[in-house]
Image: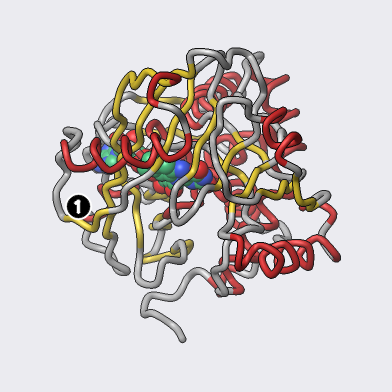
Amino acid sequence: MNITIIGGGLAGASIGYHLVKLGNSVTIYDRNDKGQATFASAGIVCPWISQRRNKKWYRLVTKSAHYYPEFISTLEKEAGMSTGYKNSGAICLFKENIFDKATKRISDKAIDNPDVGEVRQLTKDELSALHPSLTTEYPALIVEGGGQVRGRKLLAALKEAFIKYGGIWENKSYDGGNDDTLKIYTTGAWGAEQAYKPEIAHQRAEIMHFKLKHQKDLQSPVVMALGPTYIVHLENDEYVIGTTHIDTDSFDTAPTEESYNYLQDELYKYFKPEEVEITEMGVGLKPYTRDFLPFIGYVANNTFVVNGMGSTGLTASPFVGHEVARLLNNLPTELDFEDYSYIEPQN
Ligand SMILES: Cc1cc2nc3c(=O)[nH]c(=O)nc-3n(C[C@H](O)[C@H](O)[C@H](O)COP(=O)(O)OP(=O)(O)OC[C@H]3O[C@@H](n4cnc5c(N)ncnc54)[C@H](O)[C@@H]3O)c2cc1C
């Protein structure tokens, strides 16, 4: 099959990679827009902590997390590159009054899913050994199965392997074609430029990069702090804290003073100001569709769309790529695509 993919973020690259491995001829067009979600992303792969009750989403992200270790080990060998994937666990902080209830909620998920790993409350000394610079009075537990990946490194490795398998990568906009080859649109937030339904909306997410002055080369676990705040170790002494979520129609990617101040306040809740050095702000545009579930399906003859990967697109994209490639090659899939291919919101 000859296939054209429009959009080379993690969604498009993952689909392209799996398609070429199945013997398809694939060209990916990517414009590398400022604000690409994959480039800005934090990289947490730990879907079991969320309190979200949507079963279709949960099936997707847990199957995706299960696929990660095998996928990464194959890809890193094929590409000869590191993706920054680490399975160092996830520390979760809670308010005292809900700590035991939260521990039970997450532990219950581990009962029939070995991917979650051990879920264990940490003593203050254990927490301090895992993350010495973190200052918090909140009680903590660790989810051993939690992991992380570096979005931009993963994308570079996928691109490398895709090209090694014979894929063609064009660093430019797709300006249409009259042929009747299959087109797959994975244009992220810029899906708003296409006329198809469901409509693609986006949130602007800002993330603060910082260095820890006395914490180098420690494989600290991801920290899921209070509310929407998280802290992720990237490499050496580099960390990020995120994130802001603002619904917007704008494609402006200049960092704002308001987000800087908000994230700086969050940062100083968890680290002493004299321990950190803020280095830069990142801005990414996270794509959403009708009900915060990805859309994966045909919107017209020969036009397939994968978009709306939202806040868990790094987690889900590799497995979605695997499954979409199988679907398009008439191979059995684990995902039931009817769960993701409807246009109107479902209850
Ligand atoms: C700050 C931040 C933190 C995040 N943290 C996490 C996390 O911890 N864990 C997690 O699982 N997920 C996370 N995410 C979500 C994840 O990054 C996204 O869901 C995912 O990267 C979306 O991938 P995508 O390929 O759909 O879109 P994108 O990565 O945005 O890629 C779309 C690409 O399409 C290209 N394009 C658009 N139109 C055209 C065209 N006409 N022609 C050619 N190219 C075109 C664009 O230039 C762009 O390169 C985070 C996102 C952000 C912004």
The amino acid at mark 1 is Glu
Question: Which residue shows up at 56% across the image and 23% down it?
Answer: 157
Residue 86 vs 258, above or below: the answer is: above
Question: The residue tagged with tag 1: helix, strand or loop?
Answer: helix
Question: Which residue shows up at 33% across the image and 18% down it?
Answer: 279
- Is residue 3 visible from the viewing direction of this image? no
Residue 162 vs 316, above or below: the answer is: above
**Which quadrant of the rendered structure holds the N terminus?**
top right
Where is ligand 1, by quadrant? top left
Question: Which residue shows up at 44% across the image and 27% down it?
Answer: 272
Left or right: residue 333 versus residue 265 is: right
Left or right: residue 113 versus residue 169 is: right
Q: Callout 1: few (<14), some (14-19), or many (20+) C-alpha neighbours within 10 Å?
A: few
Residue 274 vs 287, above or below: the answer is: above
- Is residue 45 visible from the viewing direction of this image? yes
Q: Quadrant of residue 265?
A: top left
Question: Which residue shows up at 29% across the image and 49% down it?
Answer: 189
| Residue 105, image x, y percentages | 71, 68
| Residue at the outermost bottom position | 347
- Of residues 65 and 297, the one nearer the viewer is 65
| Residue 212, image x, y percentages | 48, 19
Left or right: residue 221 versus residue 339 is: right
Look at the numbered disc 1 and say if its residue's Cβ is closer than 8 Å to ligand 1.
Answer: yes
- Of residues 9 and 231, the one nearer the viewer is 231
| Residue 326, image x, y percentages | 65, 52
Q: Which residue is mark 1?
A: 193
| Residue 258, image x, y percentages | 18, 42
Residue 293 vs 217, above or below: the answer is: below
Left or right: residue 55 versus residue 193 is: right
- Of residues 133 and 28, the one nearer the viewer is 133
